[in-house]
Amino acid sequence: MPSTSIPKQEERNWLDLPSDVTANILNRIGMVDILENAQKVCTAWRKICKDPPMWRVINMNDIPIFGAKLSRVEMCEHAVDRSQGQLVDITIVFLYDAEFMSYKFALMKFPLLEELNLYEITISKEEIETVGRYCPMLKTLKVNKRGYEGSLTRYNEIAIAIGQNLPGIRHLELIGNRMTDVGLRVILGNCHHLETLDLRECFCIDLKGDLGKQCSKQIKYLKLPNDSLEDYPYIYAIESEYDEDDYYYADPYDT
């Protein structure tokens, strides 16, 4: 009679996995678990967790507001330091910490950086100039800040700085920017490789005449000031009394 007993499963030792496979797995668990748990498991895992390629993409929105042992700023600093200049893509959202603002310049000085996403972050023309000087590979820039803050002059200065310092940019989002036609003309006149331009809630520009025609002719994927914000990641849709979707700004610091 054949045996009906279930063969004992062979125990798997996760430490026997190739380092690249382990790195792939650890990359999926997120920044918080890497810094607070995974790197403490063993020497081999700690070595992998400190390897610069592990930190080529950093998304600060993955960090919870509460519950982590390290602050969001501390985690960002650890992640940026560990990238050792190999940072390719970084997304920063809602970092109000005054301590972080003085650290922000360091984030711009990465020669391999291809994508810089800033949501609800105040930025200056000097920082745009720094990006242009130290990030020659940059292809995507998102400076999205809903709600008016600052003068038209300051917004125009930022737009002009983008045009003058980032001529190789291909994808640009400026949601909520208060630049006028002056700033937009500088961007269009200098950024000849621009394929995507998001101008939602840029209500201080006039696209009814020649400027609008230039945008339509030059830009392959164009979003206009009154286009829907439905896909903007930091607002939520609510039903209004007029049976249409309304949107409100979602600040994760509001509890």
Image (spheres, grey):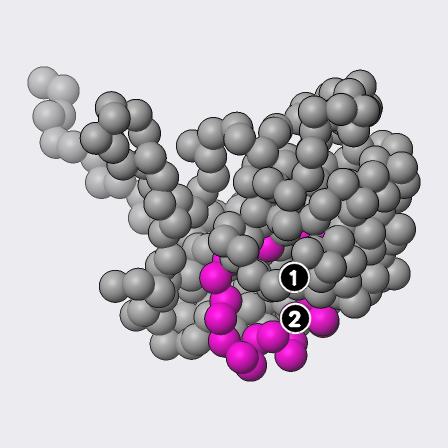
Image height check: is 198 above or below 138?
above
Image quarter (top left, top right, bottom left or bottom right) of the C terminus: bottom left
- Which label was assigned to residue 104? 2
Q: CA distance from mark 2 to mark 1?
A: 22 Å
Q: Nearer the viewer, residue 137 or 38?
A: 137
Magenta segment boundaries in residue numbering: 91-118
Res. 94 in view: yes
User: Residue 237, located in which quarter of the rendered image?
Assistant: top left
Give yes or no for contact between labels 2 and 1 (Cβ–Cβ under 8 Å).
Answer: no
User: Residue 174, located in which quarter of the rendered image?
Assistant: top right
Left or right of 69 on screen, residue 83 = right
Q: Which residue is mark 1?
A: 151
The spot of residue 110 in percent (x, y) is 77, 61
Secondary element under disc 2, as helix, strand or loop, is helix
The spot of residue 6 in percent (x, y) is 16, 32
Res. 59 in view: no
Of label 2 and label 1, which has the lower sequence position?
2
Q: Amino acid at mark 1?
A: Ser
Membership of 92 in magenta stretch? yes
At 72% from the left edge and 71% from the top edge, which residue is drawn?
A: 106
